[in-house]
Amino acid sequence: YSVEKGDTATLRPIIASAGITAILPTSKHYVWVASNEGVRLYKDSSPTTLFKDIQHVTWLYEDNQQTLWVCTRNNGLFQCSYQHILAHYTNDQTDFNSLIDNDVRCITQDKAGNYWIGLYGGLCRLEPRSGIIHRYEYDPRAEHSLSTFAVLALTTDMQGTVWIGTYFGSIMLINPQYAPYTYIGAFGRDGHRLSNPIVTCACADNKRNLWIGTNGGGLNYYDRTTGKMSYYRLNAEDPQYAIKAMW
């Protein structure tokens, strides 16, 4: 459905397709839709390209070169043009230069053009020129490691910092050019912590601040200038809804 600007009451049906799991508008006229039918490109609400073999989609992402990346629950990561599947990245237990597993939840591109891939089993970085895949896994013995095993959300801000939302490990940030991980946890006093350790989505705005969706803690807003966290909740006492997506 769509809602016209200025109209808060009218939902206009656009696409009749069962089981929609992700949408990605790429311009005024084009939108990618992942559903039980596969991944399809619509132009002005009319169906065009269809990748029917790509199923169980968790996330759609368009990079700086207008290439589509499709994350799936059981079948790895697809790189697609407007007409063709360009590459398919999966786990190969005999090849360390492959994804950690096939349960891909999210992806983002950093300022150097590399791709950070969030998986249920950890984090990968793909260098497109060389094809090399670096793995980052949870290691409780390491000083600089992921805070938990599963990465559910990724976003890159205007400064080039990659924000890593995890399952029960709160959120971490890393600037690939300068420093190791910095950790923002869910424990401590209000204004200096997340409201919930399960981060389901994240979105950086044009002021370098971060909006963080959680699974049961409502919406968090992190001010980079002050280092303070604000909370958007129904109220302070009741359990909060899960935030599933932001744009």
Image (cartoon, helix red, strand yellow):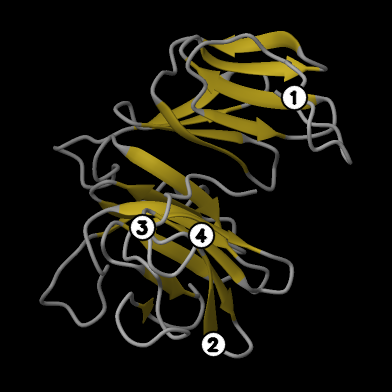
Residue indicated by mark 4: 234
Alpha-carbon distance for marks 1 and 2?
A: 38 Å
Q: Residue at x 39, y 71 (%)?
A: 172
Amino acid on which the number 2 mark rests in the picture: Gly
| Whether residue 114 is situated above or below residue 31 in the rendered picture | below
Badge nearest the viewer, 4 or 2: 4
Residue indicated by mark 2: 227
Specify whether residue 181 is in view. Answer: no
Alpha-carbon distance for marks 3 and 2?
A: 25 Å
In the picture, residue 14 is in which quadrant?
top right
| Whether residue 142 is situated above or below residue 131 in the rendered picture | below
Q: Do labels 4 and 2 touch, CB within 8 Å? A: no
Q: Do labels 1 and 2 touch, CB within 8 Å? A: no
Per the rendering, the mark at residue 11 is 1
In the picture, residue 16 is in which quadrant?
top right
Of residue 33 and residue 158, the one placed in the foreground of this image is: 33
Amino acid on which the number 1 mark rests in the picture: Leu
Q: Residue at x 25, y 72 (%)?
A: 145
Q: Which element is circle 2 on?
A: loop
Q: Quadrant of the N terminus?
A: top right
Q: Which element is circle 1 on?
A: loop
Per the rendering, the mark at residue 239 is 3
User: N-terminal of the two: label 4 or label 1?
Assistant: 1
User: N-terminal of the two: label 3 or label 2?
Assistant: 2
Alpha-carbon distance for marks 4 and 2?
A: 23 Å
Alpha-carbon distance for marks 1 and 3?
A: 29 Å
